[in-house]
Amino acid sequence: MMFFALSKQAGQIAVTNADVQEKFPGLVQEITSNLGAFLPELILAVGVMWVIMADLFTRRERSRRMGFHAFAFVAVALVSVICHGFSGDQELFRGMIVDDGFGAFFKVLLLVGTLICIPMVMMTRSFDGRRMGEFYGLLLGSVLGMFLMVTAKNMIMFFLGIEFASYTSYLLTGYLKGDRRGAEGALKYVIYGSVASGAMAYGLSLLYGLTGSLDMADVAQGLIVSRTTDVTVLIAGLLCFAGFGYKIAAFPMHFWSPDVYEGAPIPFTAFLSVISKAAGFAVLLRFAEGMVGTGNWELTLSNGDVVGVDWPLVVGVISALTMTVGNFAALFQRNLKRLLAYSSIAHAGYLLMGIAALAPGAENAIPGWQAILFYLVAYLFMNLGAFLVVSIIAEKTGRETLDAYRGLGSRSALLSVALGIFLISLIGLPPTGGFTGKVQLIKAVVDDGQIWLALVAVVNTVVSVYYYARIIRLMFLEESDDTSKVPLSAPVSAFVVLMIVPVLWLGVFFGSTVDFIRDLTLTLG
Amino acid sequence: MSAAGRGREGEWALSFHAIIFWALAAMTIVPAIGIVVSKNIVHMAFWLLGTLLGVAGLYLHMEADFLGMTQVFVYIGGINVLLLFGIMLTNREPLYVRAAVKRPAIASAVLLGVVVAVGLIQSFGATEWHTVKDAVAPGLADASAKAVVNGDGTAATLGTYLLSDYILPFEIVSILLLVVLVGAAYIARRDPEGGSA
């Protein structure tokens, strides 16, 4: 029968323009009117093509200037996001993506992070003599993919956004082609990434089969209306989580991250550990809001049985394992990039606490997702700041190991104090953004009644003091044979100071940020 | 095609479908096992051909004619042939893949596979699935449902949906392909200043 259908179709054009007009009245007008809210993405898409094309007309030794072009496009995109505002509340492109405060917040976060990473790339000497047009093209493309992740409403966009961000990340990890560690990292990244995406695609297809829809709001409704077998919902959810968990480097999908972080160029490691992770959390939050946040994951049947997958418990267990694995593995690292990789796994664990407490039971409680948003802002500055110092030290000394930090306190006061502040913030001690952020996350799970998870987080924080404080001790309490000052140019010093300010600001004057996040909307449609 | 519940004719049609399905399933799975078991990489590539063909057959059997044909064009005509070219151009003697894994590892992998398979079959069997006809939301499901009912191919409906409801993914994929092509060209390019390509 289908062969008959094929042969029949070959002879005719099945759909005419009139059909389209009849089926989709006002389609063209609708899509055109959506383009206004899509402006930042369009700017990035033009930027991708611009830097690649403009690089062709630039001499190789001037190719690094493409960084200014990329910076300009990101800055313009940032302005357009802010001008568009945070009060949007509409679906775009027939429900594929949404324009809401949550998405706009993440877009600003991603763009600010990229604005910090681009100068770091321009400072890195290992890129000298290479054509940089492709690098910035891929970087902007990666941000574009993450924009789709953070605004996605349809499961197709979840998948497409994650794939977009991943493919570009594989290429950027191996951008220094002669570097063996880079090549190894890129290859491991590809293999883990494809397995994770395959698992996620399978999970999404199961959800589609259960609910008959790809739209996250419909899926959320469908899972409530049709009480299907919980085991299948659990399997589907866990398979999907494989994809999201790989993006945020959560246990047990974290194995790629130490090798990739160590192999990738430092600025891109910073990008992966913060920006890529933030985008991963955004898409995971949208997914989890559909699966859990509707509050109906638990249903009491007429005979008194309670059915439903206990998602808060599942996520809580993953969160506890992630932070424990990250922190304990970090204890034994000698390479600072690798140490920060494990520490970023631990931070993914802390952040997952917010997802475990997505639907707060107590009145006036902070919803978990708002705690995550605040923590991500703090994490953006403290982790990028730490990577900035690591990058500067690696440029000056050529080393990434802990030995390079011995006696740094007497060699460069600014760098050592800055790194000290970033590390204190990563531990989660006052008066830094890391402290206020972690308090909110812990408060969210306590309000939700998951005391055990809060205890695990506190114990983990104590463990993490050991390896963070060891770096601080090396810098200030130990002597180095090399006592020469580390020279810093004025712009670089200013850059470092600029990173310290928000970390301390968020630790002291956190109220305005908390209020801002409270007013954001997270729509599922 | 939903002939179930129409007396003997319906039952016959149902069992006929079942026979085709199981034949296609065997055609997919047997070569898949062949890929895992065989040691010669050329044999693996040919086994893969069988699996891909079986999957295309499954698509066609589910009346996803466009998808089935795309599977044949892209995977068999493109990727598999490319794979064979790659093997034949890079190796003059047959390449054998020696399994570096120990026997206990293989045993535990087989055990895990069986457990997962049984678990999935158990839970999926007890699940209430939604077919394309009772989809709760419009979209692709709706499109393919209509095509199935009308007996048309799905290509026209898919095309309409790609340029209406799914226009954003459609356009984004083109940007994605552009970016990835540029990246692939960069990785494959030989650097003039002596960086190993």
Image (cartoon, coloured by chain):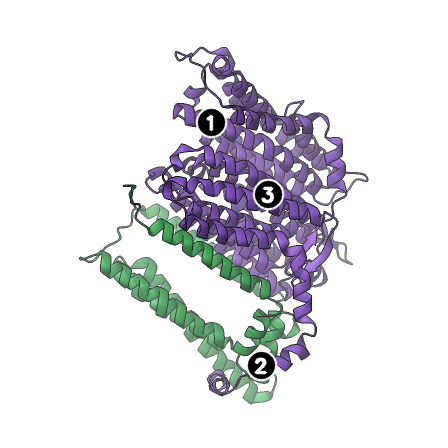
Chain colours: A purple, B green
Residue pictured at 58% horizontal, 81% vertical? A15
Label 2: which residue?
Answer: A15
Which residue is the site of mark 1? Answer: A392
What amino acid is found at the position of numbered circle 1 in the picture? Ile
Q: Earlier in the sequence, mark 1 or mark 2?
A: 2
| Residues marked 1 and 3 touching at CB (< 8 Å) | no
- The chain letter for the residue carrying disc 1 is A
Secondary structure of the residue carrying numbered label 3: helix
> Are dots 1 and 3 on a single chain?
yes
Mark in the foreground, 1 or 3: 3
- Residue A354 drawn at (x, y percent): 66, 40
Q: Measure how far apart labels 1 and 2 are at the Cα level.
A: 60 Å
Instruction: Return the mark for residue A75.
Output: 3
Asked which quadrant contains residue B110, the reply is bottom left
10 Å crowding of disc 3: few (<14), some (14-19), many (20+): some
Mark 1 neighbour density, 10 Å: few (under 14) some (14–19) many (20 or more): many
Position in image of residue A520 (x %, y %): 74, 45
Residue A175 screen position, x and y as percent: 40, 43
Q: Nearer the viewer, mark 2 or mark 3?
A: 3
Q: Secondary structure at mark 2?
A: loop
Quadrant occupied by the C terminus of chain A: bottom right
Q: In the displayed structure, does residue B34 sit left or right of residue A484? A: left
Of B131 and A158, the residue lying toward us: A158
Q: Is residue A189 visible?
A: yes
Could you tell me how far apart the alpha carbons at marks 1 and 3 are, in whole angstroms?
24 Å
- Whether labels 1 and 2 belong to a single chain: the reply is yes
Of residues A440 and A411, the one drawn nearer to the viewer in this rendering: A411
Tag 3 subunit: A
